[in-house]
Amino acid sequence: MTGSYNLTIRPGYDEVGREYFHHSSGQRINTDAVIIEALRKQYPELSVVVAPAATCNLLAFAGSGHALAAPIQDTTDPVYAPIRWRQYIPPARRLDHGAGALADIVMFGKYIYNWNSHEFIVYIVNGRDGSSAYPSVVNNYILTKETISADQLIIAASKYGSELHNEVWVFDGGYWQKSGELWQSVQHSKWEDVILDAGMKKAIINDVDHFFDSRDTYTKLKVPWKRGIIYYGPPGNGKTISIKAMMHSLYQRKEAIPTLYVRTLASFAGPEYSINQIFGKARQEAPCYLVFEDLDSIVSDSVRSYFLNEVDGLKSNDGILMVGSTNHLDRLDPAISKRPSRFDRKYYFPDPNFDQRVAYCHYWQHKLSDNPDIEFPDKLCIAIANITDKFSFAYMQEAFVAALLAIAASQNSVDADLYVGPAKSANLTSRMAADPLSGEDPDLDDLILWQEIRKQIKILREEMDEKSVKHAK
Ligand SMILES: Nc1ncnc2c1ncn2[C@@H]1O[C@H](COP(=O)(O)OP(=O)(O)OP(=O)(O)O)[C@@H](O)[C@H]1O
Ligand SMILES: [Mg+2]
């Protein structure tokens, strides 16, 4: 192609192309090959077995007390000293007042490793090949006299790493991670603290228990052993605490059933990748309880068909019980909520009725029974239930918490009155007198909890009314 251009294109000469291809075809670097060659030279009498640290974390295994790893000091040359990154790990909860801890990330290290009366030399090397920053590849190079014992070590350490130790699997940010915090919170979640219609509570518990008990029945009937349940209803009425109480009771079974808890599909590789990872893990962990909090926001229109493919596609989902919670059943596509063997069982969690509100007040009465400052007779439960019609449990909780805080604050200010005189407490009494709900039951009017909770309920009701007006517009 010359001729028709003014600029000269030189045929048969392409400096740029030559440079580009030269630059792009450098020798492939393989840290594995370099390390293995060097190890064979240094320890000709030993065999080398390589295990990736991502699935076999030998240092964590030793750290848990299952093995011993002592750093080898075989050189005084500082150039070849171990390389570590030191990282500060904050405490899981700031409230626990923990100091956090320093943890080392080993980039290059060598250890004498003892496990099960076997001795190994282990090199841990981060071989970040080429220019790619991700993923980083860290391998264990295990030097041994008998490869069979190295194989056993790899199995034991990998198994330990894949098991949970007072943790729950949580899917967040595109991968499964272990959460000790959720596990802790589940330990405190009990069915006795969940107030629901007695029949519904029994059905909810039985549904799940029966499912995990009836593998044989499903097999006999030749139907896949899988189910989906939806908990729906307005916010704050016990969907999440029921899921947590269920998780707790499933961990208590003779053969504990693990929970896989999905928070979001958002990930670096897109929601389809997340769905694939989620169901892959669920099949691996089955029988298991697979939780989707806020199902309607998880299964959006764009991923629905992909999701359904995993739910009832070709791969077996035997032993997987899915539960999804939602405030908006109507937003869920009928393909999900109406088709048998998907999420075909549904439970509605309504705002509590009068009896349930009384029961919830009794729960607080019990909670406060060892507090000498709070007088809480039975008839206060009825009085509070009477004025909280249309409140959710969460709103009732808010009324109790706010009232108790206000009482604590006013008691502090009464203490302060010792110094500033009685004006403040007089002020408190006049505010009480202005309360329009005051005087409904003269016997109760002296109780500080009743005085405060009435005020809080009034504030919350105004807030609720405002919200519903906005909603109606
Ligand atoms: N049925 C209930 N019995 C006892 N307490 C309840 C009940 N429902 C809600 N609560 C109280 O309200 C709080 C919030 O409840 P929960 O998180 O279960 O609501 P939810 O139904 O999951 O709401 P959302 O739809 O907003 O997720 C709970 O921590 C608990 O203190
Ligand atoms: Mg919830």
Image (cartoon, rainbow, N blue to C red):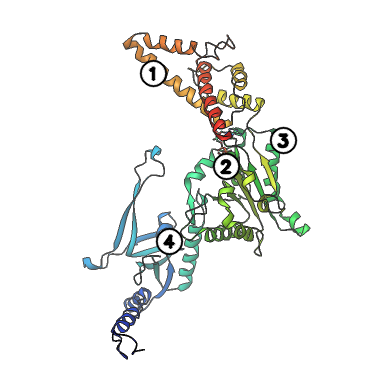
Q: Measuring 50% from the left and 59% from the top, which residue is drawn there?
A: 270
Of labels 4 and 2, the one closer to you? 2
Q: Amino acid at mark 1?
A: Asn
Please tell me whether residue 348 is drawn above or below residue 388 in the rendered image.
Answer: below
Q: CA distance from mark 4 to mark 3?
A: 48 Å
- Percent position of residue 455, x then y: 51, 19
Residue 76 shows up from this direction? no
Q: Quadrant of the N terminus?
A: bottom left
Which tag, 4 or 3, sits closer to the chain's start?
A: 4
Q: Which labelled disc corresponds to residue 244?
A: 2
Q: Which residue is mark 1?
A: 412
Tag 2: Cα neighbours inside 10 Å, few (<14), some, or many (≥20)? many
Tag 3: Cα neighbours inside 10 Å, few (<14), some, or many (≥20)? few
Which tag, 1 or 2, sits closer to the chain's start?
A: 2
Of 334 and 195, nearer the camera is: 334
Of 396 and 197, nearer the camera is: 396
Q: On the picture, is 91 further left or further right than 220?
A: left
Q: Which residue is mark 4?
A: 57
Give the secondary structure at mark 1.
helix
Q: CA distance from mark 3 to mark 1?
A: 45 Å
Q: Which labelled disc corresponds to residue 199?
A: 3
Please tell me whether residue 90 is drawn above or below residue 418 in the rendered image.
Answer: below
Q: Amino acid at mark 2?
A: Lys
Tag 1: Cα neighbours inside 10 Å, few (<14), some, or many (≥20)? few
